[in-house]
Amino acid sequence: MHFTKEYDLSSLMISISGVRGKITQGFGLEEALAFSKSFATMMNGGTVVVGRDSRPSGPYLESLLTSALLASGSSVLTLGLVPTPTTKAVVNLAKANGGIMISASHNPMEWNAFKFISKKGFFFSAEENQKLLSILQSGSFTKELVSPKGYIDSGEDYIDLHLSSVLKRVNVNKIKKKKFTVFVDAVGGAGSYVVPKFLQMLGCKVISHNCNPDGTFPRPPEPTAAALKTVEPSFKKSKASIGFALDPDADRLVLFTPKRGAISEEYTLPLALLNVLTNSKKKSKVVVNLSTSFLNEEVASRFGCEVIRSKVGEANVVEEMIRTKSVFGGEGNGGVIDPNIPSFGRDTLSGIAHILNVMAETGKSIDELMDELPNLYMDKQSFPLAKGMSLQSLYEKFTSEFSPKLISEKDGLWMYVSDSWIHIRPSNTEPIFRVITETKSQTDLESTLKRVKQCVES
């Protein structure tokens, strides 16, 4: 008898960021096993890399996933508690068939997720995600083997190769000579061990804060400047040269400076970009997403470089970087993407290395580098969609209100309006829509936000 179960996926967030949901509301053992078996079927007996963050549900989801992979004939290279970029890098370095990072990133503790990784360390494309879902809904899983040949092995040596690959992108000796004191807040997540170790390899004195991965997040998991206000006193007490804050899976990076405290996540990418373009010998292309600040255009213009804007989402930025042969890229949420590192995605280690390197090369403090960048006038808000309203009708209200000079519909609605932009789009990771706005002055921002509020609430 052939029996195919119909799975209710309505409560899950399924996108290029993988599949995520609340453990007790749609992403429990039954659903996780179904996705594990579907993924194992796609891997077809090859080697698979598995990493996770510090969420309490991580170990049992890892065991479930490992069992499904072994039963289908795959071997598992297990990394334990590591950043998402490290898992991606190891897939590439080990020439594995694919991998999974078990992490719901900045979502609260009751959430977890599978981030699906294909060959060469890239997140699943839309086509690969659709294939995975087709296998799940049809129930056409690989049958369990009586005598599978797969095995479990540690990927610890590959983790060190990831760290070494990042070190090759900077002048390690110059950074070491500076003997920077660096403050790290890993929110008790996946970067709790790897990031301090990496900084020590750069000769830094490390002040570890919230680096105990005990299954709790001692501050809000999304590392925004507002969320980090409670951490500022600890950073200032440390007298560190610079501070870095991470999200739970350590693919997003936010800075503290001695003068400013926690600063916007939008500054991470342009500061790293400054280092890359300073050391680039030719005019190049850089890719950022539609929701990322003008700051990157300002830095790129100093070097005669072109900035290209992609859809939101790491996979979309990477796809555009490959298409345009860009030297660098990233997202304004603190995601730095260096194509010369085998993670080829948002990588906190890359961001840390490039920012420390520009400090070492120029002899300038992080606050002096910040003084050379324009002020940021940006607002990011999230809203539930009003009952009975479609996204399309919402977009029409914004278009009517602002009469934009330029429109892009490649990812929601992006409008350019007199030296400012507004981006309205559904979230890939939460059941909400986002409105991101950037202007050239505080007065313009306040005026624009009043009009945004009218569009959302009326």
Image (cartoon, grey):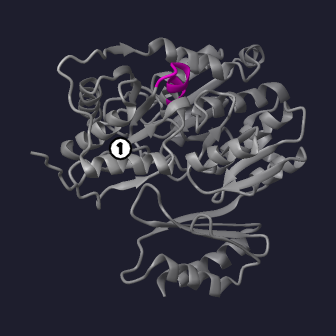
> As rendered, which of 272 and 364 lies closer to the eye?
272
Q: What is the x, y in percent for residue 277?
A: 83, 37
Q: Which residue is mark 1?
A: 113
Residue 151 sits in quarter: top left
Which span of residues is magenta-colored? 88-96
Specify whether 47 is left or right of 350. left
Q: What is the x, y in percent for residue 139?
A: 24, 46
The amino acid sitting under disc 1 is Ala
Q: How busy is the neighbourhood of tag 1: few (under 14 within 10 Å), some, or many (20 plus)?
A: many
Q: Is residue 41 depicted above or below 93 in this figure?
A: below
Q: Label 1, secondary structure: give it.
A: strand
Q: Is residue 96 depicted above or below 394 in this figure?
A: above
Q: Is residue 17 depicted above or below 87 in this figure?
A: below
> As rendered, which of 308 and 362 lies closer to the eye?
308
Report the residue that reaches farthest toward the front. 1
Judged by its main secondary structure, the magenta piece is helix
Q: What is the x, y in percent for residue 416?
A: 73, 72
**In the image, what residue occupies the spot 51% across and 79% down?**
392
